[in-house]
Image: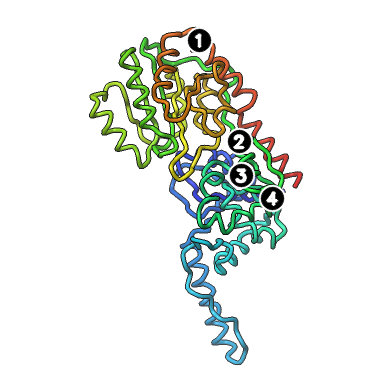
Amino acid sequence: MKLGIFTNQHGLQHNSFIRRYCEDLHAGATVFSRHIIESNWNSENLISIEAEKLQEFLIRKRRKNALKKILLPFRRTKPALPPADPIPSGKRLWSDNVLFREYFTLQLKNSGITHAFTQYINHAIHLDPIFKELGIKHLARGHGYDITQVPKSEWGEAHYNKANLLDLIIVPTDYQKNILESLDVTTPKVISQVCGSDIPENFPQKTSNSEITQCISVGRFVEKKAPLLTIKSFLKAAETHPSMHLTMIGDGGLLQQCQEYVAEQGAEQLVRFMGSVDQSTVIEQMRRSDIFLQHSVTAENGDQEGAPVAISEAMANGLPVISTNHSGIPSMVKHEFSGLLVDEHDIHGMTHAIIRLTQNIKQRNAMAQESYHYAKQHLSWEREKKVILNELENL
């Protein structure tokens, strides 16, 4: 099997799961990306299919055609390609773009790709006609927004039914599988497997002996992760237990709003914003913490989480999780065993849950153990990797 991995964006710091696919899924895999961001990602074979590369490809073709015209004036030549337009948007597919199709096809042939693994179902739909034309087996990895938000868009209404043409789809949990069934995506085989994390061999020992209860939240500051609701719940709990601290890791459009709210509440000493950091720092901070917080909700446009990687990482590092009954989260966090779940937008419920685990250290430690052991059995990267490779080999 010669594997090609397609990701729309290569190098985004918060996409640790995509980085893992690019670096560790299959030795010798070739990675294709439309947007390459300078980073420390170590993809062995990385090929750019960015707009700039399409422009360069077009220029070379025009020069070649011009030379042919000079040397063979009486021979009919193919017409020059139209100017390279941006990657198609709206109702079009990327594969509808003649230049993109020709360039991507050339790269696939030169790389000898036999199997493709594409991130996000909508991106898989964009590329599938090219893979079909070349006889390349194609597995799509669904996540969150591509299952809950994209189908409702203008593009989704025009094209999402083409997901039935894919060879195989892997989604995080049965929750997403049921959504696809409700969208009449039933022809391809659809299986569920969460994005895995690296699991320590033994239960991670806390590296901070502080008497302060350390809470942590990791994720982009976007609507579906509702960081402000996490902050409000935490600060309410801190009114009862002031010996608490919250570390928030991540960036995004809602970061400034959250920082301003904390300042208005005079709570800068209780809440620390670290911004976007590398993965090793995330793990280090988790191991200095006692409780993981994430108040995920359904965004106004319908966008939802899949099975948040940050939650599986927190569980792998022995943290009890306080989160919401949202999307695939209840499939990961067992209420009253590995954490506590509340309804979306239930600030009072989350506040009570934080207070409960702050007061009851024995229960908190028991949930921490349960989190770790569940993650080791069900949420490991090695488990996910084995599932993906087995399914690819069997296509």
x%, y% of residue 236? 33, 20
Q: How far apart are marks 2 and 4 (CA)?
A: 32 Å
Q: Distance between the residues labelled 4 and 1?
A: 49 Å
Q: How crowded is mark 1: few (under 14 residues within 10 Å), some or many (20 or more)?
A: some
Q: Which of marks 1 and 2 is in front?
A: 2
Tag 3 or tag 2, which sits nearer the N-term? Answer: 3
Residue at horizontal 43%, vertical 21%? 349
Q: How far apart are marks 3 and 1 (CA)?
A: 36 Å
Per the rendering, the mark at residue 175 is: 2
Q: Which quadrant would residue 273 be assigned to in this image?
A: top left
x%, y% of residue 30? 61, 50
Tell me the residue that label 3 is attached to.
Answer: 141
Tell me the residue that label 1 is attached to.
Answer: 363
Q: Residues within 10 Å of mark 2 (few under 14, many from 20)?
A: some
Q: What residue type is labelled 4?
A: Lys
Q: Disc 2 vs disc 4: Cβ atoms closer than 8 Å?
A: no
Q: What residue type is labelled 3?
A: Arg
Considering only vertical position in the picture, is 384 above or below 375?
below
Judged from the image, the secondary structure of the residue bearing numbered disc 4 is loop
Judged from the image, the secondary structure of the residue bearing numbered disc 3 is strand
Residue at horizontal 50%, vertical 23%? 341
Q: Distance between the residues labelled 2 and 3?
A: 15 Å
Q: Which amino acid does label 1 sit on?
A: Gln
Q: What residue type is labelled 2?
A: Tyr
Judged from the image, the secondary structure of the residue bearing numbered disc 2 is helix
Tell me the residue that label 4 is attached to.
Answer: 2
Judged from the image, the secondary structure of the residue bearing numbered disc 1 is helix
Considering only vertical position in the picture, is 48 above or below 365?
below
